[in-house]
Image: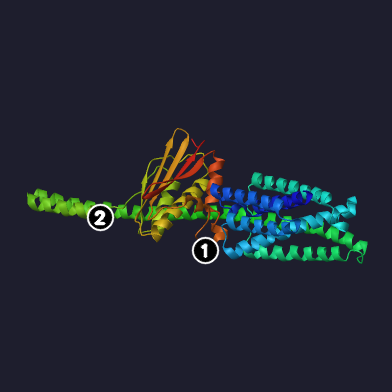
Amino acid sequence: MEQLNTVIFDIVIEFLLIFLLYSDTIKTSLYKFYTCAVIFFFSVVLLYVLPNIASPLIDFFLEMLLVFILLTDKWYNKIVSFVLVYILDSLLYQALALICDLILGFPIFVGMNTVKEKNIIKTIIILMLAIALFIKIRKKYHFSLSLKNKIFICGYTGTICIILSISQLYQNLINSYFLYSFALLCIVSSGIILAYIISLSERNINYENLQKQTQYVNILKHYYNETKEKNLEIRKLKHDIKNQVNVLSQLLESENYKEALNYIDSLKKHTLNKTPSIIDTGNVLVNAIIMQKQAEYPDIKIISKGAIRNNLTVNDYDLCSILNNLLDNALEYSAKNNFSTVWLNIYLEASVLLIDVVNNISAPIDISKFSSTTKADSINHGLGLAIVKETVHYYNGSLKYELSESQITAKVRLFTVA
C-alpha cells in the first residue's frame, strides 16, 4: 500500500508539472478531462491489482497518455514534452532527497528504499508545485516553451539526473565533499531552470505587448492612409459634381429637358460608382480594424452593424486584440472555404459592450479545438484565443461560440466599459 501511495504521488507530481509548463497548450474541452479521469481511475485499479514491479511501467504509460491527450502540439513536440516532465519529476525527487539526506539527515539518498521518507519528499514536491502553479495563474505567466527550449532543458536536467544516479550506485566510493558540492549544484540548477522559465515567460509577455502595440500603430496608420485617400476621392468627386451641375444648368437653361434627364441618369450611375464606401461605427479604432481587415481580405466583404462611442473605458490595445483575433479566425476560415461574407455586430447595451463575429461554415465544427492554432508559427500565434479569454476575463466578461447549421458566431461580452 505504501508503494502504491508513492506511485500515486508520482502521478500527481507529473500532472502538476504538465499544467505548470504546458497550460497554454492544453485542450480545454471537458471530454478530454473526463477521458483523463477515466484513464487515471483504471490506472489506480491496475496499481492495486498488478504487482509493485509493474507500477513504474503504469506510471510511464499514464504520463504519456496524459501528455498526448491534453496537449495540442505536434507529435514530436509531445514526445519531448513527455520526456521533459519525466526527467523533471526524477530530478526534483533525487535532488531534494540528496539535500534532505545531507542537511537534515534523512536516510533517503543512502537507502533509496525507505517508502515513508519517499512519500514525505514527494509531498513536499507536490506542495512546491501547487504553490508555483498558483503563482503562475495569479501572475498570468505564459510558459510557451519552444522545441529548442524543451530540448535544452531536457539535456541540462538529464545530465544532472545521470550524475545523481551514478552517485547513488557508487555512494560508498564518492567523497562526502562531492555530495555536498553536488547538492549545492542541484539547488543552483533548480534556481537556474526556474529563472530560465520565468525569463521565457516575461519575454513572451513583453513580446505580446509589443505585438499589440505594433498592431495598434499599424492599424491606425492604415486607417489614416485610407481616410486620406477617401478624402481625396471625395474632393475629386466634389469638383467633378460642380462641373456636372454647370453642364446640367446649361441644358436646363436651353430647355433641352430630354437630354438633361438622360444626363441625370448617367450622372447617377457615374456618381454612385465613384462614391467611396465609408465605414463608421462611431469608434475610430473599430473603423480602422475593419478597414485593415477588408484590405487584407479584399475578396471577403465585412458587413458591420452597430454603433459605439470613442471614449470606452476598455483599453484600445485590448479591444484591438479581441477584434483582430476574432476577425482573423473568421476571415481565415472563410478564405480557405471560399465564403465571401463575414459579419461584425458591435454595440453598447447599458454598461456592456457586445461583440458578435459571424461567418459561414462548410461543415460542423468541433468548438473544443479552437484553443489550438492552424498557423505555422504556433509559438507566437498559438496564444491568440488564450489572450482573448484573458482579456475578456479582465473585464468580467465572457467568450462563447454558438453553432447553427450554416454559421458559427463568436460572442464576446465585456462589462464595466461604459
- Crowding at mark 2 (Cα within 10 Å: few <14, some 14-19, many 20+): few
* Residue marked by disc 2: 273
Q: The disc labelled 2 sits on which kind of residue?
A: Asn
Q: The disc labelled 1 sits on which kind of residue?
A: Ala
Question: Which of the two residues, 72 or 312, is positioned nearer the viewer here?
Answer: 72
- The residue furthest top is 350
Q: Can residue 165 be seen here?
A: yes
Q: Can residue 15 be seen here?
A: no
Q: Are marks 1 and 2 in contact (CB under 8 Å)?
A: no
Q: Secondary structure at mark 1?
A: loop
Question: Which of the two residues, 267 or 343, is positioned nearer the viewer here?
Answer: 343
Q: Picture coordinates of residue 18 (x, y %)? A: 65, 54
Q: How is the image coloured?
A: rainbow
Q: Secondary structure at mark 2?
A: helix
User: What residue is drawn where x is 25% and y is 55%?
Assistant: 273
Q: Picture coordinates of residue 354 (x, y %)? A: 44, 40
In the image, which disc is placed on residue 179? Answer: none
Q: Picture coordinates of residue 328 (x, y %)? A: 45, 54
Q: Nearer the viewer, mark 1 or mark 2?
A: 1
> What's the CA distance linking mark 1 and mark 2?
40 Å
Is 379 situated left or right of 312 in this image? Answer: right
* Residue marked by disc 1: 376
Question: Which of the two residues, 400 or 191, is positioned nearer the viewer here?
Answer: 400
Quadrant location of residue 168?
Answer: bottom right
